[in-house]
């Protein structure tokens, strides 16, 4: 039976590369022969649009999976070879309102997709908010990637994610392990960037993923509904996300052994004082 890795990409700070990372990790894995499902939980639907998917009137989307009791097979769109998407649109906000009033609301996504095994990876793109869907993503996912841009608020947002996961873990006795912390939009010409990367490396060690350098081609690719791999395979962005994809693939054996930590000790050790250390020494 296929062992599916379920990875959410999240940070409570907006503009730190969550959707860019979810999109490129999903496509990168599919280009390496993995069968991938990308789940768009954001009503702004940037992951959906980023693959050039235009949701037509009446087309089943995430809302219909969660509220109308459709199966994922009725909702999923094949966006690229090996890459499938559960698309989002403005109805996702209505889905969240509906779920919020239901019993067991934190487990809706798990109950819908938790027993699906036909994919090697499920990648969840989350909105930057503490919400019912955020809690659903935490309890559905077994791993998390936290993109961190080189600024204070992005680091704080990442720490808030770990604290939220810890609180959920105490209640449900399940929480995701850290797949990686991802330095995003790195510009090594600035002292702040050097400081942030150094402290993150000290805190997370082998869980610090390869850096994503600043690259204006991300915007141009998104405008055409393409990933950076399609837009310019030789760009800095394509090279960097290729390395991130390889790093995630290399974790497969280790993470199969380490799934579903109950204590959350690694997350707790990492969260204490990181922001203070970064910005006291900057």
Image: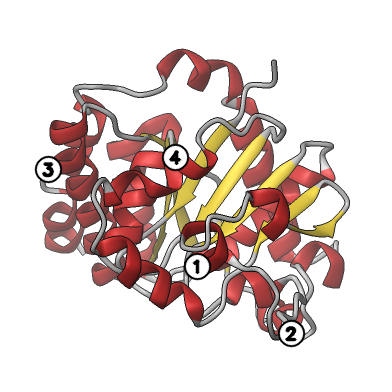
Circle 3/circle 1 CB separation < 8 Å: no
Tell me which residue sits at (38%, 32%) in the image: 205
Mark 3 or mark 1, whichever is nearer to me: 1
The numbered disc on residue 272 is 3
The numbered disc on residue 111 is 4
Mark 4 or mark 2, whichever is nearer to me: 4
Tell me which residue sits at (41%, 22%) in the image: 259
Compute the Cα span from label 3 to label 2. 38 Å
> Residue 166, image x and y in percent?
18, 39
**Element at label 2:** helix
Compute the Cα span from label 3 to label 1. 23 Å
Mark 4 or mark 1, whichever is nearer to me: 4
Q: In this image, 179 relative to 64: left or right?
A: left
Sequence-first tag of 3 and 1:
1
Sequence-first tag of 4 and 2:
4
In the rendered image, the quadrant that contains the C terminus is bottom left
**Element at label 4:** helix
**Vertical side of 124 occupied by 6: above or below:** above
Compute the Cα span from label 4 to label 2. 38 Å
How packed is label 4: few (under 14 Cα within 10 Å), some, or many (20 or more)?
A: some
- Residue 256 visible in image: yes
Q: How is the image coloured?
A: secondary structure
Tell me which residue sits at (75%, 60%) in the image: 238
Q: In this image, 34 relative to 163: left or right?
A: right
- Residue 208 visible in image: no
């Amino acid at each position: 039976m296929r062992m599916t890795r379920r990875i959410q990409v999240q940070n409570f700070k907006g503009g730190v590369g969550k959707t860019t990372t979810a999109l490129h990790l999903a496509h990168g894995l599919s280009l390496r022969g993995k069968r991938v499902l990308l789940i768009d939980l954001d009503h702004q639907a940037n992951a959906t649009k980023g693959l050039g998917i235009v949701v037509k009137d009446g087309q089943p989307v995430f809302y219909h999976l969660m509220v109308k009791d459709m199966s994922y097979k009725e909702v999923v769109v094949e966006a690229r070879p090996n890459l499938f998407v559960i698309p989002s649109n403005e109805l996702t906000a209505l889905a969240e309102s509906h779920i919020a009033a239901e019993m067991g609301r934190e487990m809706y996504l798990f109950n819908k997709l938790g027993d699906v095994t036909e994919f090697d990876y499920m990648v969840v793109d989350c909105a930057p908010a503490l919400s019912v869907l955020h809690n659903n993503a935490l309890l559905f996912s077994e791993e998390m990637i936290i993109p961190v841009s080189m600024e204070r608020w992005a680091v704080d947002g990442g720490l808030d994610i770990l604290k939220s996961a810890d609180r959920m873990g105490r209640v449900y006795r399940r929480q995701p392990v850290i797949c990686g912390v991802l330095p995003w939009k790195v510009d090594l010409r600035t002292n702040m960037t050097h400081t942030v990367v150094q402290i993150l490396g000290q805190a997370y060690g082998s869980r610090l993923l390869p850096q994503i350098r600043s690259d204006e081609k991300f915007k141009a690719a998104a405008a055409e509904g393409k990933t950076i791999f399609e837009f310019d395979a030789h760009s800095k962005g394509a090279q960097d996300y290729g390395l991130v994809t390889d790093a995630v693939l290399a974790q497969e054996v280790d993470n199969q052994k380490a799934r579903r930590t109950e204590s959350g000790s690694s997350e707790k050790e990492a969260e204490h004082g990181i922001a203070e250390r970064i910005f006291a020494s900057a």
